[in-house]
Image (tube, grey):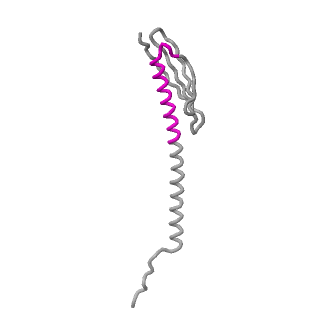
């Protein structure tokens, strides 16, 4: 007796299920990449705000005898700083930077005390 020759290949149901699995996986990958892209943009804004604050504090420290309080807007980041004279040889500096984050408006504050050379 001869056996039946086996059919090789996939059934229509197997192909449809495989396509559904790959489609769901592709959609999940696309959704997660959008979340990652938004997070990277938010981190870039936060880094830019920190860089602006750091630059402003360095500038104020270098000009501590003539430094005055002020504010400005740079690259969609609101920067406000204040200078307070502690005594003739030191100043207290406060820099606040505000920017838009995914959760709304965010403000970061940096404080420093700088010596003024004689």
Split into 4 quadrants, where in the image is the C terminus?
Answer: top left
Image location of residue 104, percent across then percent down? 60, 36
Q: Position of residue 59 (x, y in %)?
A: 47, 22
Q: Residue at x 46, y 76 (%)?
A: 9
Residue at left 57%, top 20%?
A: 70
Q: Residue furthest left?
A: 1
Residue at 58 percent across and 35 percent down: it is 100
Q: How far across and down, in percent of the image, does residue 75 sit?
A: 55, 33
**Along the line of sight, the residue nearer the viewer: 78 or 4:** 78
Identify the residue shown where x is 44% and y is 10%. 89
Question: Is the N terminus in the top left, top right, bottom left or bottom right quadrant?
Answer: bottom left
Q: Main secondary structure of the magenta part?
A: helix
Q: How many marks?
A: 0
Tell me if residue 50 is in the magenta stretch: yes
Query: Would you place residue 18 above or below residue 90 in this image?
Result: below
Q: Which residues are magenta?
A: 40-67
In percent of width and height, residue 77 lies at: 56, 31
The residue nearer to you, when weighing 91 against 73, is 73
Looking at the image, residue 102 lies above or below residue 20: above
Residue farthest toward the right in the current orientation of the protein: 104
């Amino acid at each position: 007796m001869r056996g039946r020759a086996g059919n090789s290949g996939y059934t229509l149901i197997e192909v449809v299920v495989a396509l559904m699995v790959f489609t769901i996986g592709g959609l999940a990958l696309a959704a997660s990449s959008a979340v990652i892209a938004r997070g990277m943009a938010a981190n870039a804004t936060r880094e830019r705000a920190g860089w602006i604050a750091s630059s402003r504090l360095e500038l104020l420290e270098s000009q501590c005898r003539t430094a005055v309080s002020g504010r400005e807007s740079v690259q969609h980041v609101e920067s406000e700083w204040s200078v307070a004279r502690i005594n003739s040889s030191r100043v207290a500096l406060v820099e606040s930077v505000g920017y838009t984050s995914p959760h709304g408006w965010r403000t970061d504050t940096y404080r420093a005390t700088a010596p003024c050379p004689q």
